[in-house]
Amino acid sequence: MKVPAPHALSIAALLLALLGALEFGVLNLLAPLENRLLDSFQRQAAAGLSPDPQIVLVDIDDASLARMQARAGRWPWPREIHAELVRALQAQNPRAIVFDILFSEGDTHGKESDRKFRDAVRGLDNIFFPMVRLTEKEGFNPVRLADLEGVLGLHAAPGADREARARLLLPEVLDDEHWQRAGLINFADPDGDGVGRRYWVAMDVQGWRIPSLPARVAEHLGATLPDLQSIRLHYRGEPGAFQHVSYVDALDAAGADRFRDKIVIVGASATSMSDLRVTPLSNTHPGVEILATALDNLKNARWMRETPSELPPLLALVLLAAVWASLRRRRNALETGIGLAVASALLLGASRWAMSERLILPVLVPLLFAWALYLYGATVDYLRERKTRLAAVAMFSRFLNANVVKQIVEQGETIESLSGKTRDVTLLFSDIRGFTTLSESTSPQEVVDLLNRYFSRQVGVVFRNQGTLDKFIGDCIMAMWGAPLDDPRHARHAVETALEMERVLLEFKTELGERGKAFDVGIGIHTGPAVVGFIGAEQKLEYTAIGDTVNTASRIEGLTKEAGCRIAISREAMEACLDGEDPAGFAFDFIRRGSYKAKGRAQPIELFEPKRKSP
């Protein structure tokens, strides 16, 4: 296949480069595809990992809801139950207790229950609570962040808006001493698809940094927080990989030392609690496990690292340039396709490997642009080749049978590839005798009709014997064997054709009746080298042979009457028929008809008449 026209290919590459700049800079329409691929890689990478064993989840699971019903009723339980849990946990000296349960409203069971909870947590510096930033749609009155600067321990950047406000669900039930250990549990969702890939380190609101709950805890544990607003989560293990202890079991004093030096996160995985989120690992990932993953990442500094934002567009540009250059340079688009497929496999493999090394390497979108250019080139390639093949079929069908045309097209031959070749061929000339006499006694229309009927039958004979119809020269047929397709038995096929043409002639003479008495033919055959190909003007090309072999075959046809036979072949043709065959078992007999001088040749031509052997 030939590559697309250089200008069309260059324009396509330029347009794709511009579309790529828009995609990476503004549109991001293909980002969901990239994210889905990276999500699948993350699932594979996470399967072989384990989370931090120091993090233990006290889980409000379905079993806890069922077993606590007699003691505490239906959820939400009285907060004094959580007070009991805090005392039971503190007795085992955990490093931290982290609640993934909001304390933004008073207990429905009464103020006394809230008081008992406050008493249980008072004075503890290792206990942490969540808060949530709400959207405008959730209809909560915003609070002025400057008013919360001290009580929440917020950090204001230089030039922060002192009037900035945010809708926050704060731990209203707790004493102020605990507010500085409160943090956000919001997802960071820059992709806008609701998939939990990122978690806030600190949310920036008009210059005010509101810390996340995992960041508060990690900092308390001595971790150095990254100078990032959010991290891409490095999930470790399947959902449920963290150590879980049922809430009701955590209340049991028999569990002493289970939580010593542990980081305890209290949250819910029960289906009725509706705290299930979509993550790369699952569509029903408990929110408490996502919080635990964020804490694991910040505590151990093992969040996902991201490549520079300039890398995907640069990779797309490099791939487009490589495909463009390859299509321009190579004769065959298939080679470019194979090269691009190998590059794709290597890049996708690199992206998968990078994921296991905690590195996000997006390659899918750049590859899509590269494949788009290749498919454009290959499609244009195919359409042009198809046009060329159709032109070849139309051209070849004029002088070859359908099966031969099919073979030529399947081999990818074109007018150019079949021209200017020197081949060993066998030429046949068949000229009508007595045509002048017949024309004088027959109307022109009848002469044309008669010739058409005769030629149609004889052309069928040529095609049946794998011959190429070269041309009609007045009332003469010129045919050829050994081109355009190779034919090791081209001489034998030519003789077979001559003998069958003689049989068809006799049948045709019988049909003509009285008019057929003067109608006869002479057939001359010669074998030798000739230059074959398409010859003529651009407006009219003919596939033909030129050279001394052609002239000699024509002269032999002219000598048939003198030799006293309808069919005469040269010694070269006869020997070509016998070449590689056992003469004793051969299908033809050859009768020598003498040697004759021919115009334009110094040496006489020795002629033979072929006869089919009797069965």
Image (tube, rainbow, N blue to C red):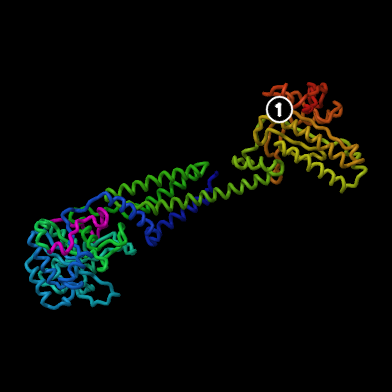
Q: Is residue 385 left or right of residue 462?
A: left
Query: What is the secondary structure assignment of the residue under circle 1?
Result: strand
Q: Is residue 99 above or below residue 470?
A: below
Q: Position of residue 493 (x, y in %)?
A: 72, 32
The residue indicated by pointer 1 is: 528
At 63% from the left and 40% from the top, the residue drawn is 408
Q: Is any part of residue 4 visible from this angle?
A: yes
Measuring 9% from the left and 63% from the top, which residue is drawn there? 88
Left or right relative to 75: residue 486? right
The amino acid beneath tag 1 is Gly
Q: Which residues are drawn in magenta?
A: 222-251
- Quarter location, residue 456: top right
- Locate residue 479 relative to residue 101 in the image: left or right: right
Observer-nearest residue: 420 or 213?
213
**Magenta segment includes 460:** no
- Quadrant placement of the N terminus: top right
Magenta stretch, main secondary structure, is loop
- Nearest the camera: 73 or 217? 73
Q: Residues within 10 Å of mark 1 (few under 14, many from 20)?
A: some
In the picture, which quadrant includes the C terminus?
top right
Q: Position of residue 142 (x, y in %)?
A: 23, 76
Q: Is residue 103 visible?
A: no
Q: Position of residue 128 (x, y in %)?
A: 14, 65
- Count of number-bearing discs: 1
Residue 165 in the image, given as x and y percentages of width and height: 22, 74
In this rendered view, identify the residue nearer to me: 349 or 161: 349
